[in-house]
Image: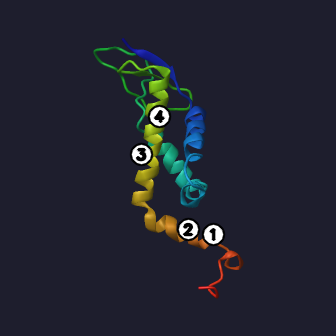
Amino acid sequence: MNTLVKLTQESVVGEIENVLGTYSYHPYQQAFAIPDLRQELITFVLNRIPCFHSAFSPTKPEAQSCDQDTIFHQKLPRSPLEQQLHLQNLIHQGVHYIFQQKSAWISHHLCESVEPACEPSHWFG
């Protein structure tokens, strides 16, 4: 049994917003507010969703690249809840992967965004 699912880039981006909302502001939400990192996370997730542009054939599916309105078929049957959990899992994987790969870059960019007048005083300790 196969399940037909339509995911648009907007629905994936919306789920990314929801999942990022569960992370702390610093450093996660702050880091993924950077457009380049946000796009990298979107790309990470979209590249891991199986997409099939043409009708699914159990013997030989023709895989195509995903676009905004691609309809894809899951090889395994999944309920809507399982689909959502799978997507959320991909997002969590992407967040951790990007942080692991770009930790120095992220630290550098987040430190640059701190205004000197807003830093805590070193006078007290």
Rendering coords of residue 96 (x, y %): 43, 52
Residue 29 is labelled as: none
- Separation of marks 2 and 3 at Cα, in angstroms: 22 Å
- Colour mode of the rendering: rainbow
Q: Is 95 rendered above or below residue 46?
A: below
Q: CA distance from mark 1 to mark 4?
A: 31 Å
Q: Tell me the residue at 54%/56% (across/down).
A: 28
Disc 3 packing (10 Å; few <14; some 14–19; many ≥20):
some
Q: Quadrant of the C terminus?
A: bottom right
Does 105 appear above or below 119? above
Label 1 Cα neighbours within 10 Å, binned few <14 / some 14-19 / many ≥20: few
Upstream in sequence: badge 2 or badge 3: 3
Q: Which residue is mark 2?
A: 109
Q: Which residue is mark 3?
A: 93
> Measured along the vertical axis of the image, is residue 71 above or below residue 1?
below
Residue 87's disc is: 4
Residue 113: mark in rendering: 1
* Label 2: which secondary element: helix
Count of labels in the image: 4
Q: Looking at the image, is 111 positioned above or below residue 42?
A: below
Rounded to the nearest angstrom, the CA distance separating label 3 from label 4 is: 10 Å
Label 2 amino acid? His
Measured in 3D between alpha carbons, the distance from the residue under mark 1 to the one under mark 2, in whole angstroms, is 6 Å
Q: Is residue 55 visible?
A: no
Answer with the quarter of the image where residue 47 lies: top left
Give coordinates of residue 30: x percent, y percent: 60, 58
